[in-house]
Amino acid sequence: MQINGPAHVHGAQPIRAPHNTTGAQPAARSQSVQASDEVSISAEADFLSRINDLPEIRQDRVDDIRAQLANGSYDVDAKLDTAIDRLLDEIA
């Protein structure tokens, strides 16, 4: 379309294909490349996803240990070492 001032607007004109130049040919592809999606899960996300696999809290056991802690009969050091060892085994 040509615009030559406000009084000289021409109507729609036909669309012409782009000019082809000889000698310019697309490069041949030697290998075909297929796109693929990839998902990567971080170690933190994997750890958080395992929360649902944890067993339910045994409230009776928690209450028993709290009572032992309150009256001083719970051996904290030995049980703490065992608990830490078990936790590290599960994480590793």
Image (tube, rainbow, N blue to C red):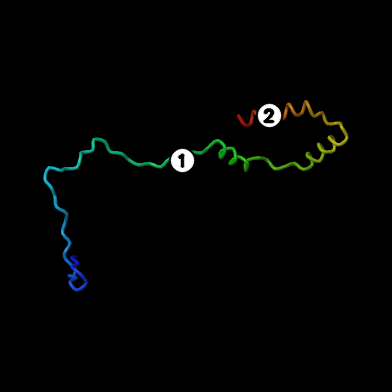
Where 28 falls versus 83 (above or below)?
below
Could you classify mark 1 by the number of other residues whose Cα lies within 10 Å: few (under 14), some (14-19), or many (20 or more)? Answer: few
Q: Residues within 10 Å of mark 2 (few under 14, many from 20)?
A: few
Single out the mark in the foreground, 1 or 2. 1
Q: Are marks 1 and 2 in contact (CB under 8 Å)?
A: no
Give the residue number, with chain letter if any, for mark 2: 86
**Helix or strand or loop: what does disc 2 sit on?**
helix
Residue drawn at (80%, 29%) of the image: 76
Residue at figure coordinates x 17%, y 71% from the top left: 8
The residue lying toward the viewer, choosing from 92 and 24, is 24
Kindly identify the residue that appears in the image at 83 percent across and 31 percent down.
74
Specify the label residue 63 is tagged with. Answer: none
Instruction: Find residue 1 and report its horizontal and vertical position in percent.
Output: 19, 65
> Is residue 75 toward the left or the right of residue 48 in the image?
right
Instruction: Give the amino acid at mark 2.
Output: Arg
Residue 14 locus on image (x, y percent) = 16, 64
Name the residue at the left extreme.
22
Q: Position of residue 23 (x, y in %)?
A: 12, 42
Q: Identify the residue at horizontal 26%, vertical 36% (top origin).
A: 31
Q: Mark on residue 39?
A: 1
Mark 1 or mark 2, which has the lower sequence index? Answer: 1
Furthest residue in direction front, as rendered = 5
Q: Quadrant of the C terminus?
A: top right
Quadrant assignment, res 15:
bottom left
Percent x, y for residue 36?
38, 41
Q: Amino acid at mark 1?
A: Val
**Image position of 28 with respect to 85: above or below:** below
Marks 1 and 2 sit apart, C-alpha to C-alpha, by: 31 Å
Image-based side of 33 in relation to 14, left or right? right
User: Does 44 sit left or right of 61 as displayed?
Assistant: left
Figure quadrant of residue 12: bottom left
Query: Hey, which residue is sitting farthest right in the picture?
Result: 71
